[in-house]
Image (cartoon, rainbow, N blue to C red):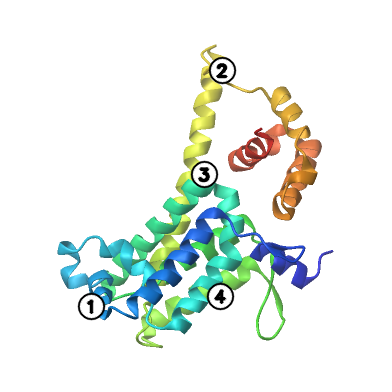
Amino acid sequence: MASGLETLQRAAGVGQGMYALTPWVTRILVANFAVFIIIQTSRGLYQDLAFYPPVALFRPWTLVTYMFLHANFGHLFFNMLGIFFFGPRLEMKLGGSVFMRFYILSGIGGALCQALFATAAPMVGASAGVYAVLVGFAYYYPRETILLFPIPIPVQAWILVSAYVVLSIYNGITGTASGVAHFAHLGGAAVGFGFLKWYEWRRGSGQRSFQKKMKKGRAKPGFVSDRTAMARWKGISIEGLHELNREEVKRLLDKVQAGGPGSLSDSEREFLDRMAAP
């Protein structure tokens, strides 16, 4: 069994002393730190990019730009820490383009949710997107063990994320820790969860539609049978993969060995297809 530290490293994308930052997570991190530096020399730009509900109708871009602004370095650091730890695994699970849509839409949902409850204060920060990433990680890896800091207490992902959500609900209702956009956190988490359920339903719906066409003899060109897919998956060069992908491929191939291709979810099958691509 892996130690809590090793599990945390896998969750964080750390393996063999190297950080496995995925492309879109890297872009998010760079963009946020770059904007923070730029804003220090132009506070007027800060006002133009922050989300302010009373005038948001005339500044719709702020629904997105507010996610790249932060009140101070601590605010920025801890938000980016969440992206750094949990984003890479989720991006590899969903694919880059889906992950980015998930992240941006969750941020927009967080802003709109906060606007329903606190219309007077401008809002900045990536927290809504971060909460969505946390929910996404717990959705796909609920039993993954996370090592808390600074006291090294191991806790499963679903418990940790559930505690964060419950705490945000409590703080939002009671007004505890004023100045924090608790309803943005909740909105981001809710939209992120809804996006993932829709994404899974959409992929499942497409698969069912395809199976119906197969029965009618109208399969789309390019269909790959289970037998062909298994042959491709078994040909994946494990040694050439990063540790995170290597472990996931091994897990999924073991799953196929035990239950056949039908035991895979659509996203798991797509992941193996990506790893098998030349």
Q: Are discs 1 and 4 less than 8 Å apart at CB?
A: no
Q: Which is more toward the observer, 109 or 46?
A: 46
Q: Is residue 223 above or below residue 175?
A: above
Q: Disc 3 marks which residue?
A: 200
Crowding near the residue tagged with mark 4, few <14, some 14–19, many ≥20 C-alpha atoms within 10 Å: few
Question: What mark, if any, has residue 163 been given in the picture?
Answer: 4
Name the amino acid, label 2: Met
Mark-to-mark CA distance, 3 and 4: 25 Å
Dot 4 lies on which element?
helix
Q: Are discs 1 and 2 less than 8 Å apart at CB?
A: no
Crowding near the residue tagged with mark 2, few <14, some 14–19, many ≥20 C-alpha atoms within 10 Å: few
User: Counting residues from the N terminus, which is met first, the one under dot 1 or under dot 2?
Assistant: 1
Q: Nearer the viewer, mark 1 or mark 2?
A: 1
User: Counting residues from the N terminus, which is met first, the one under dot 2 or under dot 3?
Assistant: 3
Dot 1 lies on which element?
helix
| Residue 262 x, y percent position in the rendering | 68, 33
User: Counting residues from the N terminus, which is met first, the one under dot 1 or under dot 4?
Assistant: 1
Q: Disc 1 marks which residue?
A: 44
Mark-to-mark CA distance, 2 and 3: 21 Å
Name the amino acid, label 4: Ala
Task: Locate residue 259: give its quadrant.
Answer: top right
Q: Nearer the viewer, mark 1 or mark 4?
A: 1
